[in-house]
Image (cartoon, rainbow, N blue to C red):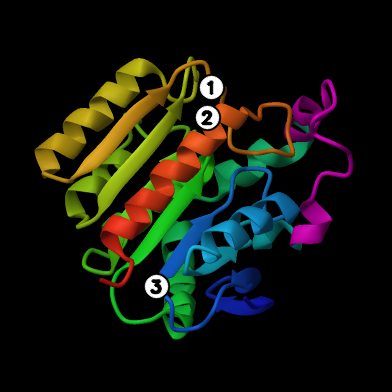
Amino acid sequence: MTQQTLSIQTPDGTAEAYLTGEDGRPGVLMYVDAIGLRRQTRDMADRIASWGYVVLVPHVFYRDGSAPDLEPEGDLREDGAREAFFASGVMDRIAALTPDRSGPDADAWVATLLEHAGDGPIGVIGYCMGARLALRTAGQFPGTVGAVGGFHGGGLVTDEPDSPHLAVAASTAEFVLGHADQDASMPLEAVETLERTLQEAGRPHLNEVYAGAAHGYSMADTSMYDEQAAERHTSELRALLERTIAPA
């Protein structure tokens, strides 16, 4: 399995991205969480690639600095470290990644992935705010995106006309969405709205709340990590990709 760092040209500049796996395999676009592209997310991409995929992980915050520049300096498993990191400007970066920016970015991400992937649909997965990007990318590329995985996603349902959940109607993907329990950024009523949207669009899906799991449960390098929920997400994600984009 090969790993490399790519430079991808976007309308707003050059973005780095991590590519792992063998060219010609089914492609997976992986959107990081709010903490960004770092060893944890590269390790997660490597695990997916080991199942037989080629995985692209873009540095979505390239407008704000390089991935190493934006990485946490301390251990986010220590008391208060994760909270301090988020108070250092992370939310400003997320707020600035509006659809008018993330849409053209997705054009570049998907085009680059398709240069390395085999024929057939691709999967798109996202964590935390990356789940929003995954839903929007599915709606942006119907017929190309065959699978969407979103885990501990926040803000998937809003009252705005560009709410991420509305992209489901334009998509042709199967969805697996694993929400964190008691997550203020994705309350139960939002999960229920998303469920109705998936049903009305006729999209095959799992849309479930992981009981007892906190927001960020998949990230082993933070204090929010929940091993049981993380392994559940891995199992359901692997099954989704095997159903939808793996070669017959």
* Residue 52 as seen in the image, left or right of residue 73: left
Q: Amino acid at mark 3?
A: Pro
Q: Position of residue 187 (x, y in %)?
A: 40, 18
- Give me the residue at 33% from left, 67% from top: 246
Upstream in the sequence, badge 1 or badge 2? Answer: 1
The residue identified by callout 3 is 26
Q: Horizontal and vertical percent for residue 25?
A: 43, 77
Q: CA distance from mark 3 to mark 1?
A: 30 Å
Secondary structure beneath label 2: helix
Asked whether residue 195 appears in the rendered view, the answer is yes
Q: Secondary structure at mark 3?
A: loop
Name the residue carrying label 2.
Answer: 229
Task: Give the quarter of the figure containing the N terminus.
Answer: bottom right
Q: Is residue 86 left or right of residue 218?
A: right
Q: Nearer the viewer, mark 1 or mark 2?
A: 2
Query: Which residues make up the magenta segment?
Result: 67-86
Q: Position of residue 29 (x, y in %)?
A: 47, 63
Q: CB atoms at circles 1 and 2 under 8 Å apart?
A: yes
Please tell me which of labels 3 and 1 falls first in the chain.
3
Question: Of helix, strand and loop, which one carries label 1?
Answer: loop
Lateral position of residue 43 relative to residue 203, left or right: right
Q: Residue at x 31, y 65 (%)?
A: 245
